[in-house]
Structure formats: C-alpha cells, structure tokens
C-alpha cells in the first residue's frame, strides 16, 4: 500500500483554493472552511426496525404498555438519533452483491465508492486504493478519531484508514492503523495482539506484538478505565484506548454484559472529544461504530441488540451535547452500514399484538448465556453416545432459563417445549438435527442448485442451539420476527444535524454519504473520479 | 354522523383570511392559495422493503444479475416514487396498538389524529368525528377524487370521507361516500352492492342498492372500460368508475391477474386527473391507494406484491407527468399506511445471496392459484376420510406448479418436497396439521397466556396451504423473508415533490402528514386541536 499513489475520489484540500478563487471570497470563513467538528455514527446492522424496536423496548421499560400511543410518544422513549432534524435513506448494496458485507459498506461510507464484499478501501478490481474522508480530514488539519465497540481492525473502522483486498488480513489492517497518524483510537482491542504476520506487514521493527508496532509509530496504548478516563482532563493525541474487559474477538462486551464501572461507548466518545479538541485543535472528524448491534442481530438476540442500540444512542447523546456548545461548527451524521438479521416488528404467531415487556426478563447476551450452556454441558458429562430420549431439560436448566430470560419452561405449550427440548439435545449432543447437513459458504442450502436440506442451519444458524431457540421464542412472544442470520438489503435511514445537514436529506446511495461529508468538510472540490458504477 | 358538529382538527378556510391579514399580503397569490393540485398516494402495506424488493425484481427482469451494482443503478430499474427529491419517515402506531390496522392509519393520514384500530374518522373514544384533508380540500373549492384498487368502502379510502366506529360497517361507509359531494371515485366496487342495510343508513330512498343511493345523490356509475376511458376526453364530475372485472371482495384484480385491456390503476389516475381538471376547476386533491399491495403481503405472495407495487408506481408516474406540466402548483406525496407481512430482503437459507430471477416464473397471484387448487381438489373427488399416505402431489399438480411458478418439484431437496407434500395434504384434506388448533382473534397463539400450539397458523396463516408453501419457497430461494401474515410496526418512508414539499422531510408521526398536507393546501391555520393522546 502506497499512500502517494492512491486515487483520491473525494479530492484534496488543494481544491479549496480554487473554490475560494471562484468568487466566493465574500463568504464567511466558516462557509469556506466547512464543518469544523464532524461526528459520523455508524450503527453496524442498524436499520429502522432496530431503532423502532429499541424505542418500543424503552416504552415497555419506562411506561409499561407499549400499545398505547401516549406511552410511545413520551420524550424519554425517543432515541437521541431520532431527535436529529434531517432525514434521508440510503441503498447499501455492494459492487457484487445486493446484500453487502461490512467491508464493502464501510468502504462506501468512508471512501465514497462501491467495491466488492470483503474488500476494504479499494475498488472491485482490487487494484486501486482510495483515500477515506477520515484521511482527507486529517490532511485538512482536523484531528481524527476512530471508535468501535468491536476490534479496531474490524471492517467498518478499517475502512477509514486501511486498503486491503481481504478484510481478514487483520494484522495488515492493524499496521495501517499504526501508520495512519490518526489521533485517537478507542473501544475494543486488536484481533491478533500477537502474530508473526506483523513481521511481514511492518518491517521497521522485528516484533510479533501489535502494541509494539503502535508504540514504534508514537501511539500509547491505555487499557485501564482509570487511564482512559484521565484523558478527559489531561487529553493527548496518538493514543489507543482499549477497555480492560473484552468479550470474544477482542470486542467490548455487549452492553447487557458490561462489567460495572467499565468505560462505555458513550464515555469513550467523551474521552475522544476531549483528546480531539484539547490544546486548540483545528477541528475533528470522529467515527463511532456501534459494532455489536450487528453481532447481536446475526445471533437474532433481541436484548443483546437493543442493549447495544441504547449504548450507541448514548454516544449520539454525547455528540448532541457537544453540538449545543458548538452549534455553528458541528455536523452529526447517524446511519447504519446495512441491516442484519431481517428484524421486523411483527410475528405471525402474535398477529397484531406486541408485548415488549416480554424482553425485560433477558439479563445477558446470547454469548454470555451460550457460555453458561457450555459450562453446564461440561459439568453434566453426558454418557456417549448421547441419548436424546433419556436426556431432557432438567430443573437446573429451567432455573437458568427463568433467571436469565424470564421464560418459565413449564408454562409453555407442548409445541414450544418440544422445540426447546430439540434444541437442548442439539446443544448437549453437538450433533446436527437428523437428516441435515452443515451449511457452508455464502449460500446456506436454499440456493439455485439446492439439493441438500439445511434445516439445522435454518433453525440455529450455527449458534448454540438452545440459546438460539430461547432467543427466537422470546422474540416471537414479543412480536418480533427475524428472517436471517446474515445481513439484508433493506435500505437504511440517515439522520443528520448541524453544519450542511441539508446534504443528507433525500434518498441516495451509501457512496453519496462519504461525498456529502467530504463536501461539508470542504475537502471534496475535485470529486468524483469514481470509474466503477 | 353530523357533518356540522364534527371537530375540525385541521382548521378551515376561514383561517386563511387571518393568514393573509397578518402582513403576508405581499406574497404571491400562489403562496397564499397553497398547493393547487395535490396527489396523495398511499401504498397500503408498503414500506422500504416492498420498494427495494420491487426494484430488485425489475433489475432481475431487465438486466439479469441482481447482484451487480451496475444493474441496480440503471435508470429503468428505479421506481418513480424513488425519483421524488424529498424524503421523510413516519411512525404508524395506532392509539391502542403499536401495530396499526388500516382504519387507524387511514384516519391518521386523512384526519391528522390517532385513533383505535378499527375506527374511521373518529377519535379513540368513538364519540368525536373529524374532518379529513379531502373534505377541507373540497370546502376550499378544490375538486376531490378517491381511487383505490380495493373496494371504495374499504378502510383507507373511507378515512377520507367517512366517520364510523366500526370499519366493518361497509354500507354506512358507502352511504357516506354518496353524501360526500366528492367529484370522482374510481377503482374497485362496493363490498355489498345490494344490502338491506342501505335502508337503515340512507332514509331518503327505500333501496337495497348502493348504485341507487349514489344515483340519488347525483352520481353516475360507470363500469365498462370504454365508458371509463371516455372520461379522458369528455370529463365530468360526480362519477364512480368501477373496473368491469373484479376479484374477491369487490377489488380490482391483482396486476398480475388483470384481464388484457382492462383499465389499470395508472389509467384510472389519468381519468381522474381529466375529471378533476376539466372545465377550469379550482384545483384538486386526489388520493390514490394501492390497496392490494397489502393483501398480497398478508398472503406472503412475492409477485402479487411486486406486481401491484409496479401498478401503484405507474400511477405515481402519471402524477409526475402532470407535475411537469404544472411544476409550480403541484404537490405529490407518496407513502404507505403501514408495512404488511414483515417482508425483508434476506433469508437464513440463502445467507448473503439474492436471486430475484427466481420470481420471474410466477405468473399469477396467490388468489388465482388458490382457485386453481380448489378446482383441482374438486375434480379429484378424494375418498373420505382423506388418506394422507396414499395421496401425493401428482404429475398434474407438478405441471401446474411448474407452469405457474417456475418451480420444478422433482429438482427440490427432500426437505422442501416434504413441506410441499404436507401442505398438499392440508389443502386437499382441509384438516389442520395434527395436534394443532385454529387461530382466532388478534393474537395468534404465541401470546402471554399461550397454552395452545398454533403451528397450522404459523405455517399457512389461514390461506390455502399449498399456495402458501409455494409462495414461501419461492420467496426463500429468492432471498426474501416474511415474518407475519398481519401488519408490522416498521416505520414507513415518505417521498414528496413540488409545492411545499419541504414539509415532508424529517422523521415524524403519521398524523403529521395530514397536517402538512393541510398546511400545503393552506386549509390548516387553526390546527391542531387534537386532544388525544
């Protein structure tokens, strides 16, 4: 990757001179300089349904009956992101898929170009590299911050600083972060803290440690709550803040699993703002990703999703507070990169009824409960071969389900009990449902040349079966439906407020958002030179 | 119902005088008079997913591969409604349900007030009646037209001229249509063309015929294509145009089932425009409902849905053509009243893949195929009791499925064959699946006090089982998912163009749309006096 040879879809600052020279000298300096402070919030997997489900959950929690308009309209039940005045909608498809992945979507949002799923910061032919709006912001004198609740080398954050044909090259992405000169990284950690691949991708130093690579490029890594919080009063730049307790894949814990007192996504946003504005900065561009909304939706986990939606929305609240102090210089954009899970607010078995109070009993994420199921299985030490007929959900498991989801097994219909028993057997035995095969690849057994039956995948999506069956049942009784364990092609709303917010009204493509942000920052005067559609 | 005592949430024309008197005399007459020509398109059951699915279908039909961004972006594959420049989003909940019905949603869109599901033009207490924006338009000197592809006394059209505590009072609604003085009705017919109830609701005449009631109020009913088309060159008012061939419930046929040469929703819109503008009218308000998008989505019928979406969008095209001739005086608004079916663009069994070409083989609606299944069953004259083991899908049925849906039974996996066989037995025997019960009421067996198992409803939703199983399988292999046979609470996009279109930007409630239309027509200066919720 050679920064010097990269195409610049979004233009560069040099063009600003031409902009000024075309007779616009009389405009206020603010108009010429563009949005000084830019917040770009990306709810990974977030569409209108995730937003509406979260407001319905809040209504049930705060006011009880979710079916009363008077409750739904209460101010406390409206998300911060729904308070932004400008509204738009974006299409999300990739260059090569109606249903995008996060790499192609991230590249569209960061670089303003379509590319193939799996590709970051490059074109579909994987030969051209693109600058991102974060890099253009940095060149313009603004500081840049990148926050994600998942690992910092994951596809969405990576799209703002990396260029790679394969999103799975996490070590290469981490090295590009170190070389980015960006001012702030915060949230999760790095997928491979130690890997021999760093020797290949970073030749200035012989090390297998990403922290050593970062340190060699001037970055300080902080991973205690106290050290991270200290930045609010003693801000600095070139800092990487990773919360101390991580869940799988080096991600921040789901909001519903967060250890008490640990820095949240919202507090990380406050820390970033302090660092990006300290010592008279020239403004900033801050991207904040709610990355685990997507993961929870992949797992069809309703409260995992809603918990992280609320966490993400709290971070939006931090930006709104900042906006109130700098109303003429701040731009806030909130959107998602795609929808995940095929979430809808209606289920056949509930007809026209909704009962979001059914979700109030869920106390932890699918990941945390799945770990408890695995521990239970180990403790049980079932005789082999596993005997489906002899092993049923016992009182211990019933108690776990009641305590963690508020679901009383004995009160359920035989239909639902049987589904839970089948899932229990699937979890305890580890064997796929009889007569089925394991799904592989991007097509999951219902395709054009479909000759296998993939019921096991249809039921459980490759997740712990018992956890998935519980997640489905509490979703269904709430009146929530899911159609997929993958992303969908649903268009995604865009909300905006502040400087040049009018640019985000209307219906457009995800690539237009990067262009509009670049335009609002006045770093785009030569755009676009995109050559693919 | 007493028009004189009705509350007027949206104010009346008298207020326009005050508006002019407050120092705005210098404004152009156009500004003071408001939007002269108003088109209000309501896609019943239409959300962003129905729109995106339709564009993907067009892409597959016109250009083949739906996974190529270059194809998705082609102009021919973009719907007319997505060409409107202003975009907004609305919440749809009723006064008493997060998931609304069409009566409460219609009342919100027509009268600007929340009410209970099932109620038309009245408040939640069923004691106050409200004027609609159509009635205010009429009072202001504009002509008014009401078009629907379902019967003209159905909830959505009724909301613009009727006030009743019970949407099922179709005869009362039809009488209110006759008393409305509106200038044009077109589309489907009346649910009860003949009924003793007309004697109760219309005392001026002793008749059981809705046509006689209408005639007595000065309306001419036309029900041949030639007579309807003749209005384009010889326009008149107080006319009711019903297409000659109707499907069930006095609705226009699904677009995919339309007899060749019959007037379409778009052509009916052309006819209405001719009648509403003929002889120097003072402008118009025209509501056009795509009512069978909803019905097809209830039945989870993908091409039934898309066919009627295209039909509806063609009608929007007529409005855009009119706008081009009257760009300074025309306002076009397009939205849905709610989503139906929980449609999403992703299915677990397809992962990230989409294959909309799989829909190109569907040649008719679920209703038309269901009728063929019923005829097949009658012809077979199965021995009773029906023998599930002995009766399987035969070559005749396989040929029907192949011809009408492009689905080759013998090429399917055992899993899918078994599901089709079970559905076939369900259709031929008429017996619910073993161990299940029939769903009743608004809650469909997955509720709070759930003690029954309603698998039969979960699978087939009360529709012909074989037709539903086919609809589901072709949806799934396309990469479409459904979660319900009812409506959902998904927020709905709003598109607008023309006079005062800025009012429709942002995120707001469905009740705000009626208020914004009233404001654009300058008939709202005293709004709102809404007291609920």
Image: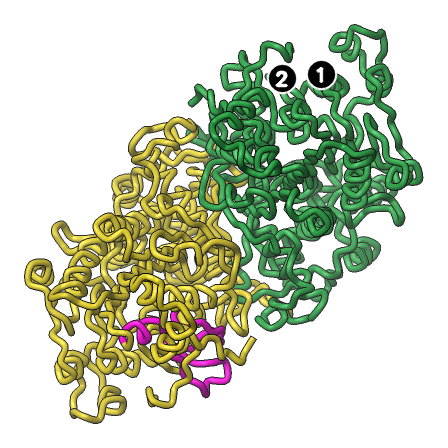
Chain colours: A yellow, B green
User: Crowding near pointer 1: few (<14 within 10 Å), some, many (20+)?
Assistant: many
Q: Which residue is mark 2?
A: B164
Task: Tell me which corner region of the image, top left, top right, bottom left or bottom right, holds residue B178.
Answer: top right
- The answer to whether A280 appears left or right of A493 in the picture is left
Decide if residue B514 is on the left or right side of residue B149.
left
User: Could you say which is closer to the camera, residue A336 or residue B128?
Assistant: B128
Tag 1 and tag 2, C-beta contact below 8 Å: yes
Q: What residue is at 72 percent from the left and 32 percent from the top? A: B282
Q: Please provide percent x and percent y for residue A147.
A: 25, 64
Of residues B423 and A388, the one drawn nearer to the viewer in this rendering: B423
Image height check: is A394 above or below B359?
above
Q: Quadrant of the N terminus of chain A?
A: bottom left
Q: Quadrant of residue B441?
A: top right
The segment highlighted magenta reads A110-138
Magenta highlight: main SS? loop
Query: Label 1 vs label 2: CA separation?
Result: 8 Å
Residue B78 in the image, given as x and y percentages of width and height: 64, 60
Tell me the residue that label 1 is attached to.
B172
Position of B277 relative to A268 (above/below): above
What residue is drawn where x is 15% and y is 56%?
A263
């Amino acid at each position: 990757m050679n920064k010097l040879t990269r195409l610049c879809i979004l233009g560069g600052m040099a063009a600003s001179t031409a902009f000024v020279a075309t007779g616009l000298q009389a405009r206020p300096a603010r108009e010429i300089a563009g949005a000084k402070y830019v917040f770009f919030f990306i709810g990974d997997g977030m569409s209108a349904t995730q937003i509406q489900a979260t407001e319905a959950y809040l209504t049930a929690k705060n006011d009880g009956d979710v079916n009363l308009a008077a409750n739904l309209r209460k101010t406390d039940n409206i998300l911060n992101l729904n308070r932004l005045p400008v509204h738009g909608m974006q299409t999300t498809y990739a260059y090569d898929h109606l249903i995008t992945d996060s790499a192609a979507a991230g590249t569209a949002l960061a670089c303003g170009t379509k590319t193939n799923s799996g590709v970051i910061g490059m074109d579909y032919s994987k030969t051209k590299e693109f600058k991102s709006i974060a890099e253009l912001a940095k060149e313009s004198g603004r500081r840049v911050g990148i926050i994600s609740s998942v690992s910092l080398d994951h596809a969405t954050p990576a799209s703002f600083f990396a260029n790679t044909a394969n999103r799975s090259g996490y070590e290469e992405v981490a090295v590009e972060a170190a070389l980015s000169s960006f001012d702030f990284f915060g949230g999760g950690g790095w997928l491979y803290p130690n890997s021999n691949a760093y020797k290949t991708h970073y030749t200035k130093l012989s090390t297998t440690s990403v922290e050593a690579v970062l340190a060699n490029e001037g970055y300080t890594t902080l991973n205690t709550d106290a050290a991270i919080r200290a930045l609010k009063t003693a801000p600095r730049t070139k800092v990487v803040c990773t919360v101390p307790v991580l869940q799988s894949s080096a991600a921040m814990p789901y909001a519903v699993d967060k250890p008490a007192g640990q820095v949240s996504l919202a507090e990380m946003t406050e820390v970033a703002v302090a660092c990006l504005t300290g010592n008279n900065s020239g403004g900033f561009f801050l991207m904040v990703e709610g990355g685990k909304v997507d993961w929870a939706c992949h797992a069809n986990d309703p409260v995992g999703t809603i918990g992280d939606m609320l966490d993400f929305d709290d971070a939006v609240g931090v930006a709104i507070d900042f906006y109130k102090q700098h109303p003429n210089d701040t731009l806030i954009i909130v959107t998602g990169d795609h929808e995940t899970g095929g979430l809808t607010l209606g289920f056949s078995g509930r007809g026209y009824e909704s009962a979001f109070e059914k979700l109030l009993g869920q106390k932890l994420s699918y990941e945390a409960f799945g770990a408890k199921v695995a521990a239970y299985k180990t403790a049980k030490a079932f005789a082999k071969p596993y005997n489906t007929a002899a092993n049923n959900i016992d009182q211990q498991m019933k108690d776990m389900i009641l305590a963690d989801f508020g679901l009383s097994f004995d009160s359920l219909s035989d239909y639902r009990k049987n589904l839970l028993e089948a899932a229990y057997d699937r979890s305890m035995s580890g064997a796929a449902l009889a007569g089925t095969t394991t799904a592989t690849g991007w097509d999951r057994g219902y395709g054009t040349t479909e000759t296998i039956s993939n019921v096991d995948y249809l039921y459980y999506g490759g997740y712990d079966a018992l956890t998935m069956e519980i997640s489905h049942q509490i979703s269904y009784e709430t009146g929530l439906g899911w159609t997929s364990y993958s992303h969908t092609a649903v268009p995604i709303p865009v909300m905006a407020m502040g400087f040049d917010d009018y640019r985000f009204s209307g219906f457009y493509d995800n690539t237009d958002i990067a262009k509009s942000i670049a335009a609002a920052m006045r770093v785009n005067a030569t755009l676009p030179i995109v050559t693919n559609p």
